[in-house]
């Protein structure tokens, strides 16, 4: 385990966990927290054999948004820089070649909802609350919320949530497809770890390729996206993982993927 003041990184086998750990401010994202988050990702990327990352928050919040105290007196230029820093960090999560799960334990508001949306998918505690309350502060989401939320839950629903700033309960988030599962608070981490283990047992190059093709295909015409899939599928056949996976199946044994 290693830590910066506000970000903890732990590892258990092929699974890394990054915890936003600033509970007295509900894990609000200041520029400093974003920097520490980036350093946490550097550490995880330097670890050999990590195949899944689970992101969560300490205390009663996942992340209650960007740090309002830090934003209060920002100039336009400072706000642009802050927004770009958050966007870059979340784009980095999407570009990482491993699966990234958000285990949303509590408030995921503003930047917290945007962080969860930048993860590959979300498991939520019954206590989770989602929302983009920025308009209540006279601003709009700045870490991707106007875009990723609409892509996940549909434009009309995203408009309503962004325009009202309303808080969304976990069961509603489940109903509209924002989260994949809602579980009792005590079992959130166990359930997230169980799905992480399931993913970690599969071919790592296949996960990287699937993540990339799904993301790149999102804004494309179906025919173009499917053409991209053909190339990525074919590319898998250059890997030892493909040979191992298929030999293991036909040999009726468990595969031992090396990510090569
Ligand atoms: N930025 C900075 N500080 C924040 C914060 C944020 N986004 N969210 C919470 N905090 C701080 C509070 O100011 C408070 O600090 P204090 O103890 O020094 O006064 C501490 O975290 C605890 O929050 P509090 O509001 O007392 O908890 P609560 O349980 O009564 O309410 C929320 C929880 C999430 C409903 C409430 O904190 C909230 O609305 N937060 C802001 C959400 C938001 O607008 N996010 C988008 C920002 S762009």
Image: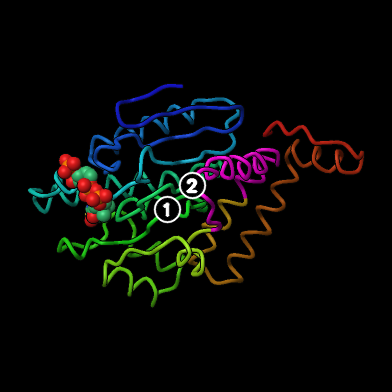
Compared with 197, 180 (above or below) is below
Beta carbon at label 1 within 8 Å of ligand 1: no
Q: Quadrant of residue 141?
A: bottom left
Q: Is residue 208 left or right of residue 117?
A: right
Toward the bottom, the furthest residue is 156
186 drawn magenta? yes
Q: Position of residue 140 (x, y in %)?
A: 23, 63
Q: Which residues are magenta?
A: 180-209
Q: Quick one: SS at disc 2?
A: helix
- Is disc 2 surrounded by few (<14), some (14 to 19) or many (20+) residues within 10 Å? some
- Identify which residue is drawn at 43% across, 47% down: 105
- Identify which residue is drawn at 46% across, 65% down: 152
- Identify which residue is drawn at 27% across, 66% down: 165
Q: Are marks 2 and 1 in contact (CB under 8 Å)?
A: yes
Task: Tell me the chief SS of the magenta region.
Answer: helix
Q: Which residue is mark 2?
A: 185
Q: Quick one: SS at disc 1?
A: loop
Front residue (pair 56, 223): 56
229 drawn magenta? no
Toward the right, the furthest residue is 251
Q: Which label was assigned to residue 127?
A: 1
């Amino acid at each position: 385990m290693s830590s910066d003041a506000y970000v903890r990184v732990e590892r258990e086998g092929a699974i890394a966990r990054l915890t936003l750990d600033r509970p007295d401010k509900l894990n609000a994202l200041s520029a400093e927290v974003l920097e520490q988050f980036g350093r946490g990702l550097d550490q995880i990327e330097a670890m050999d054999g990590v195949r899944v990352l689970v992101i969560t928050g300490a205390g009663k919040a996942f992340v209650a948004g960007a740090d309002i105290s830090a934003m209060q007196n920002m100039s336009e230029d400072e706000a642009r820089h802050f927004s770009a820093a958050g966007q870059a960090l979340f784009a980095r999560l999407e570009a990482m070649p491993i699966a990234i799960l958000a285990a949303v334990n509590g408030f995921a508001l503003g930047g917290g909802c945007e962080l969860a949306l930048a993860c590959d998918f979300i498991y939520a505690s019954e206590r989770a609350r989602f929302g983009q309350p920025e308009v209540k502060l006279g601003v709009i989401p700045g870490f991707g919320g106007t875009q990723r939320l609409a892509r996940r839950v549909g434009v009309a629903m995203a408009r309503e949530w962004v325009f009202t700033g309303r808080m969304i309960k976990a069961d509603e988030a489940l109903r509209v497809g924002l989260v994949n599962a809602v579980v009792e608070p005590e079992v959130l981490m166990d359930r997230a770890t169980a799905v992480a283990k399931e993913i970690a047992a599969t071919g790592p190059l296949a996960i990287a390729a699937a993540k990339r093709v799904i993301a790149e295909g999102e804004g494309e015409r179906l025919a173009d996206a499917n053409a991209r899939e053909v190339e990525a599928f074919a590319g898998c056949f250059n890997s030892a993982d493909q040979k191992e996976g298929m030999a293991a199946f036909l040999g009726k044994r468990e595969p031992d993927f090396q990510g090569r």
